[in-house]
Amino acid sequence: MVFAHLPAGYLLAWQREKLMSKNWSKWKKKQLGWMTMLGSILPDIDLLPFMNDQVMMVNHRTLFSHTPFFYLVVTVGVWLFGLLEDNRFAGEVKDWWTALVSGILLHLALDTYLVGIKWWYPFNSRLYGLFAPNFGLVGLWDWVVKYGLSPYILLEVGIIAVAVGVWVKYGYLRK
């Protein structure tokens, strides 16, 4: 998945609000929506150091930020913080973290669609993915062209189209 992480995060935030926000204020709904969308792109923060390394930009899913284990460790830390700090702020942090992690897990699931991620790291370093097209270790632009001409792009186009439709019809996070 290349282009649809943020639109998919938008759709998840919209559905999450519809299912879980009975007593939330409008401000809290927006906060958690934005946190979910941030989570949907956060694992790609590992791209920043590799902006000049086209091969690594294509293969960045092998790094720690694309492993569920990393987020499990951080989640345990947030949970312990919540136990130690039993106050309203700790509850807010848990809500924010839950929204963020839901977006992160969505990102990891979408990256599993193509190429894969290390779902069982640190116990296994194998990439697990649904489809593993043999684009080879090519540069970024070669990969984008090959991906853009493949049938795998159709899921991304569908996600983006649905997200745009929801934004136009419902105006979620626009108001």
Image: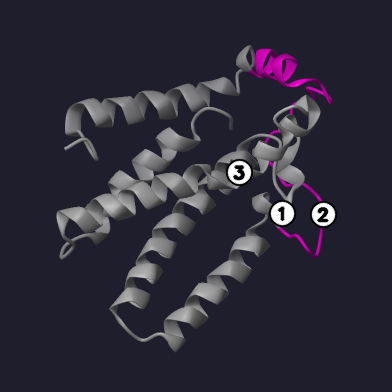
Q: Secondary structure at mark 2?
A: loop
Label ID, residue 64:
1
N-term-proximal mark, 1 vs 2: 1
Whole-percent x, y for residue 104 in the image? 52, 51
Circle 1: residue type: Phe
- Name the residue tied to disc 3: 45
- Report which quarter residue 69 is drawn in: bottom right
N-term-proximal mark, 3 vs 2: 3
Which span of residues is magenta-colored? Answer: 120-147
The residue nearer to you, when weighing 34 against 165, is 34
Left or right of 157: which side holds 171? Answer: left
* Residue 71 in the image: above or below residue 41: below
N-term-proximal mark, 1 vs 3: 3
Q: Residue at (49%, 36%) from the top-left corner? A: 5
Left or right of 22: which side holds 10? Answer: right
Identify the image quadrant of the N terminus. Answer: top right
Q: Nearer the viewer, mark 1 or mark 3?
A: 3
CA neighbours of label 2 inside 10 A, class few (<14), some (14 to 19), many (20+):
few
Circle 3: residue type: Ile
CA neighbours of label 3 inside 10 A, class few (<14), some (14 to 19), many (20+):
few
Circle 2: residue type: Ser
Whole-percent x, y for residue 111 in the image? 61, 40
- Name the residue tied to disc 2: 125
**Magenta span main SS:** loop
Identify the image quadrant of the C terminus. Answer: top left
Tags 1 and 2 in contact by the CB under 8 Å rule?
A: no
